[in-house]
Amino acid sequence: MDEFERHGIAVVSGRDAGARALRSPSLTSDPGVGSPSLLLRDGEGHTRVRAVLREIIAGLEPLPESLQAGIEASVGGLGPSFDLVRDFARPVAGLVTSAVLGIELDDGSLDRLEATTANLDVFGGADRAGQAAAFRLAVQLGRTPAGPGGLTALRAAHAAGRLDEDELMINAVVLAHAAYENSLNFLACAGLELATSGPRTVRELVTAVCPARYVLRFGPDGPVAISLADGLPFGLGRHACPGSGVALAEGEIALTALAEHLGGACEVRDVHWKTHPVFHGLASAHVVGGGVTGVRK
Ligand code: HEM
């Protein structure tokens, strides 16, 4: 029995059943707590907030050259022995998330984003540490001066009456979190896949890794966990990932650079996994030497 079923949550698995559930009008993303996050609502509020975030994300399509160069420099600077999470995936995901918001996210902010996920209690328990980390980050982002980019665009949308105060505050964190955590987990796991199996396209890798394993919906008979592991890595329907183009583009650049950096035979040691029921990722994995077999175009 999987962890959701142990908590009395029905699980939908398989690609077709998952697709049907994600498109079903009788299942909503809104748990009924009045959250201003676009992930936890449907209808007019969701459509309005999502339109603002889509405009922001479109600013990175195609990926700006400066961001590409930053990713290549970060991966090219790796030594012969490094950790796939700390040294490869975290800096790249940090660069992309900084570019999304248009501000430089320091190590403390990345720690808060990771703490948000690690403590995100999808079963509605009493552990509030994830919410506290998200709240602190929201306050911090609210005070951060920003140049052109996502944070300024969110503030402009608020000034124009497109977002209320709560929507402005929460969705800055939701956007940063969605971009950072999924990129981090995808890049590290894909790096491990490349190091231990043959060449694959970035799309094959994201489907194999499936960094967001489940999404939650609420129906007449209670909550439902929909598995994305059978070929729906970016979800489907109203909430389908609006950042999938950015995710694939950053993956292409970072994983190609990783393959080039490595080259000859490499060894991966001390592989440790995170244990979150939704976000699937590596905690750490140590790479020594060369040998990644490449990213097929
Ligand atoms: C490999 C990397 C990524 C994966 C696997 C991924 C996966 C997903 C999935 C499965 C959802 C749907 C959630 C649901 O239906 O409840 C989602 C939503 C979202 N993603 Fe991504 N994502 C990735 C990267 C990104 C990036 C880079 C961005 C931003 C640039 C982003 C922004 C968002 C946002 C804003 C939402 C909420 C959409 C909504 O609720 O309407 N994601 N993502």
Image: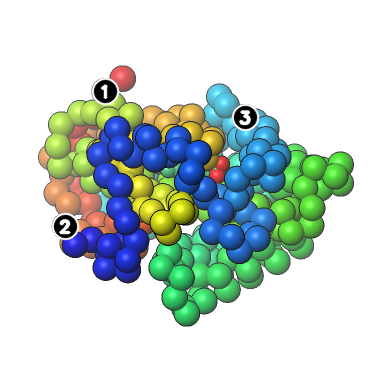
Quarter of the rendering containing residue 87: bottom left
> Does residue 92 sit above or below 199 in this rendering?
below
For the point 32% across and 56% down, the residue is: 10
Mark identifier at residue 269 = 2
| Residue at 14% over, 37% down | 197
Q: Is residue 97 visible?
A: no
Q: Secondary structure at mark 2?
A: strand
Q: 102 and 53: which one is in front?
A: 53
**The one of 189 and 174 positioned closer to us in this rendering:** 174
Residue ID at (30%, 47%): 12
- Label whose residue precedes the other's in the sequence (3 or 1): 3
Q: Secondary structure at mark 1?
A: loop
Q: Amino acid at mark 1?
A: Arg
Quadrant location, the N terminus: bottom left
Residue identified by numbered label 1: 296
Specify whether 208 is left or right of 124.
Answer: left
Tag count in the figure? 3
Sequence-earlier tag: 3 or 2: 3
Please tell me the numbered disc located at residue 274: none
